[in-house]
Image (tube, rainbow, N blue to C red):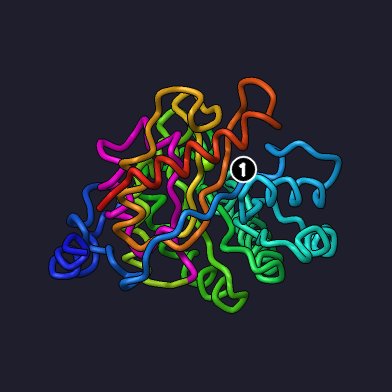
Amino acid sequence: MKRRAFLKSSMVGAAALGAVGEVAQFGSNAAAEGDKEAVLKLCSQEGRIPGKDCREKVLKLEEWGAVGIEIGGAPGTRVQEIKDALKGTRVKMGALCWGSHNGDLVSTDLEKRKRGIDDLKQALEVAGELESTGVIFVPCFNGQSNLKPDELDKILWDILPEVGDHAQKCKSRVLLEPLNKGETFYINRLEQAAAICEKLNNPGLCLMGDFYHMSREEKSDTDAFVRGGKWVHHVHLASWRRVLPGQDDRKFVDGFRGLKQIGYQDFCSLECGCDGDPEVEIPKSFRFLEQQWREATI
Ligand code: MG
């Protein structure tokens, strides 16, 4: 609690402009969830879970102690199927893993850009219908844009306010996902995404953290989540080798400490491969994560 008090007292104003360069002072966004105690809500991408259909996967997740499922793309044609799969269980809809739409939203071709924006808006409508925590969005992967980061910033500032308003209308949000430099030259760390969120200051525009990318780009998992602060609304879980947490020596305690400091309330979702039999290894990984969460004292 002391820590939280410190963070509150160190609140500063909006992040520096030229966002994707040097940003927000330590703790600027923290503690926005108020004094709510953080919770570990285990979740998984649908494809990671064995099972013949979505219902079977949801039941398995529930049995293994998870409370969320993340679905790929914009599953507009699957809304009823997914609602039926969740019915009567504790499992809720996590994020929709949507991606970059080939970088169209930051394309200099305005037709392409419009198509990308329209499709993201549609994904947000599906997210709203499913009560999803948000739609994961990557502006561009490597090779999808020739623009420089500051040029890409300007496009985001231009297009995202309208998308964020739409997200709010749908009762969902866009989730910017920072990736390691092997996957994108643009937005590699949480503080860079947070600077964009700070500047736009729209509750429909938030961010997420992925432990796999963070292990390559962040100096401190704790500081990364604290800098992400109130904008952090989803987490991806994977080990250093991008297999299940606990299958190599990647630790989660420091990151979980950061999530506790910001009073994190959303899902932590498996996005990874698996060494061995998933029926055995996934429950084991969930127990490992619960142990890491207990060890993350603040
Ligand atoms: Mg990810």
The stretch in magenta equals 204-232
Q: Position of residue 192 (x, y in %)?
A: 32, 50
In magenta segment, residue 216: yes
Considering every residue shown, the one lying at the far bottom of the view is: 169
Quarter assignment of residue 202:
bottom left
Q: Quadrant of the N terminus?
A: bottom left
- Out of 168 and 117, give the one closest to the viewer: 168
Task: Report if the beta carbon of the residue with label 1 is closer than 8 angstroms to ligand 1.
Answer: no
Number of marks: 1
Task: Name the residue type under label 1.
Answer: Asn
Q: Position of residue 104 (x, y in %)?
A: 59, 49
Principal SS element in the magenta part? helix
Circle 1 is placed at which residue position? Answer: 102
In magenta segment, residue 246: no
**Residue drawn 41% across and 58% down?**
232
- Out of 173 and 281, give the one closest to the viewer: 281
Q: Secondary structure at mark 1?
A: helix
**Residue drawn 18% across and 55% down?**
26
